[in-house]
Structures are given as structure tokens and as C-alpha cells.
């Protein structure tokens, strides 16, 4: 009886409240720290489709660097300095960057991701993010023959295949083309040469079938490339740098 009274005494309740507040405080601190890291240093994404096969598959969990700091540092001109990504890099493209988002829905989505270990998100939030491979940089001339891109570098005038410009070897997945498809179609396997603007890059899927990328969008602004793939940490048997 005495123990039961002690358990519900004022002092015991006060101690419990203080303990709960400390736990809540440190959870809040960790949450803020985590969101600062994932906003300005890195981001964690779950690939939801197979457009980057055979390098990446649906369900892969990926860590991307973040380029957000570039926009906050006044002494660094993002567009006139060497870009933080190169030809052949897998990057995160946010085609809606610059569009104002509802603050409260964005805050709710961040909290939902945090407390569910990235398993649950608000519907529609990830629709604007695309994982693609950079093929060409500002000023380059890019064309495609039989689903393989050829790039003429703006830096030195060299004309090479996409793999010859890449630091890491990769093999795009080449789809069969229906016999009646005209070469002018975006997914026919051929593309006439185009020259990129001074703030444009060309990004594509490794799966060269009918998946949306710069073949349908056209070149994307360099400011829309918000991160570069650093590491795949799941599944375990494919862990590493793709």
C-alpha cells in the first residue's frame, strides 16, 4: 500500500514529468539536427522504380550529397565555378525546385519520414524528385545513336561516347525497338545533336526504354540538380557505390 502511494506521490510524478521532458528535449534536438543534416549535407532516398537498371533497382536505399549550401554561400558562384557533379554521375533532380511549397505540409512530411525511418511519406512529395545520370554538361554537344550517347566536350572539343567520359563504368539497358517506330521519336534510340546552354545539363535513365528524362523534358537547369549519389546502404548484398 505504501509503495503504491509512493508511486503516485507528487514527488514521483514530478520526477516522471522531468524525465519525460528530458527525453522529449533530446528527441527534439536530434530531430532538428537530423533535418539540418538532410537539408544541407546529405539526403536519404528510396528508389521507387527501375528506371536506373541495371545500376540501381526499386527499393534501393541511397545517400545523396546535398548542394543546398552552394545557394547559401555568397562567395561561391554555383554556375561559374566548377560544378559539383561530372559526366557519368548519378544525381538527384528536383524539377520543382523554386516552386513555393506549403510550409506545414513540408514540415509534416519531414516529421513523418523521421519517425518512420523514411518508410512513410505524404502522398505526392517524392513525385518531383528523379534519380538520373548526367550525360552532358553546359556547352556540350550531345547526340544519340542506338541508345548510346555521344558527347562533344565544351572544354576541349573531344567527341567521345558517354562511357568514355565517365569515371565509373556502367551499362545502359537497351530495349528492343518496334519495327514501325520512326527515328524522330524520343525513345527510338536516335537523337540529333543539340548544344546545351551555359546553365544546362542533360540527364537520362540507364534504362533507355520509354522513361522520362532529358529526351522528353529537354535539357535541365543545373540548379535543379540538388544532389549526387554517394552510397547505397540497402539491400546489404548490393551495398556500396553503384
Image (cartoon, rainbow, N blue to C red):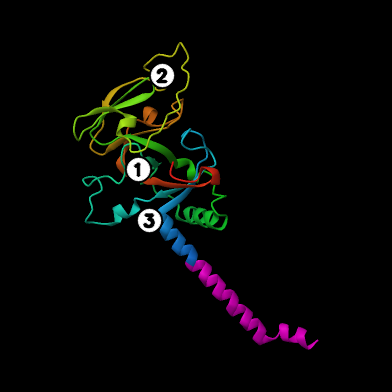
Residue for point 19% across, 30% down = 157
Distance from disc 1 to disc 3, alpha carbons, whole Å, reads: 15 Å
| Kind of element beneath mark 1 | helix
> Which of the image's four quarters has the C terminus?
top left
Residue 203, position as x, y percentages in the image = 36, 34
Q: Is residue 4 above or below residue 191?
A: below
Q: Residue furthest right?
A: 1
Crowd rating for badge 3 (residues with CA inside 10 Å; few <14, some 14–19, many 20+)? some
Q: Is residue 41 above or below residue 91?
A: below
Total marks in image: 3
Precedes in sequence: disc 3 or disc 2: 3
> Which of the image's four quarters has the N terminus?
bottom right
Disc on res. 224: 1
2 vs 1, front mark = 2
Magenta region includes residue 52: no
Q: Which residue is mark 2?
A: 188
Q: Which residues are magenta?
A: 1-29
| Kind of element beneath mark 3 | helix
Specify the quadrant of the image occupied by residue 103: bottom left
Distance from disc 2 to disc 1, alpha carbons, whole Å, reads: 26 Å
Q: Is residue 111 visible?
A: yes
| Kind of element beneath mark 2 | loop
Precedes in sequence: disc 1 or disc 3: 3
Disc on res. 209: none
Q: Is residue 235 visible?
A: no
Precedes in sequence: disc 2 or disc 1: 2
Distance from disc 3 to disc 2, alpha carbons, whole Å, reads: 39 Å
Residue 143, position as x, y percentages in the image = 30, 24
Q: Which residue is mark 3?
A: 40
Q: Residue furthest left?
A: 156
Residue 117 placement, left or right of 38 = right
Amino acid at each position: 500500500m505504501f509503495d503504491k502511494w509512493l508511486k503516485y506521490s507528487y514527488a514521483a510524478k514530478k520526477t516522471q514529468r522531468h524525465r519525460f521532458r528530458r527525453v522529449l528535449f533530446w528527441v527534439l534536438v536530434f530531430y532538428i539536427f537530423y533535418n539540418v543534416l538532410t537539408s544541407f549535407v546529405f539526403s536519404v532516398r528510396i528508389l521507387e522504380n527501375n528506371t536506373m537498371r541495371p545500376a540501381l533497382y526499386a527499393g534501393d536505399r541511397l545517400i545523396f550529397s546535398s548542394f543546398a549550401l552552394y545557394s547559401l554561400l555568397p562567395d561561391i558562384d554555383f554556375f561559374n565555378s566548377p560544378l559539383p557533379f561530372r559526366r557519368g554521375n548519378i544525381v538527384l533532380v528536383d524539377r520543382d525546385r523554386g516552386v513555393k511549397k506549403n510550409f506545414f505540409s513540408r514540415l509534416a512530411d519531414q516529421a513523418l519520414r523521421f519517425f518512420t525511418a523514411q518508410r512513410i511519406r505524404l502522398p505526392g512529395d517524392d513525385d518531383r524528385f528523379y534519380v538520373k545520370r548526367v550525360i552532358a554538361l553546359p556547352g556540350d554537344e550531345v547526340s544519340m545513336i542506338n541508345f548510346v550517347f555521344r558527347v562533344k566536350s565544351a572544354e576541349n572539343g573531344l567527341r567521345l561516347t558517354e562511357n568514355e567520359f565517365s569515371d565509373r563504368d556502367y551499362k545502359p539497358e537497351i530495349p528492343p525497338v518496334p519495327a514501325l517506330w520512326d527515328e524522330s521519336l524520343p525513345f527510338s534510340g536516335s537523337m540529333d545533336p543539340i548544344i546545351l546552354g551555359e546553365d544546362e545539363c542533360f540527364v537520362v535513365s540507364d534504362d533507355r526504354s520509354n522513361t522520362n528524362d532529358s529526351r522528353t523534358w529537354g535539357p535541365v537547369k543545373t540548379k535543379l540538380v540538388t544532389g549526387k549519389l554517394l552510397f547505397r546502404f540497402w539491400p546489404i548484398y548490393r551495398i556500396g557505390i553503384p
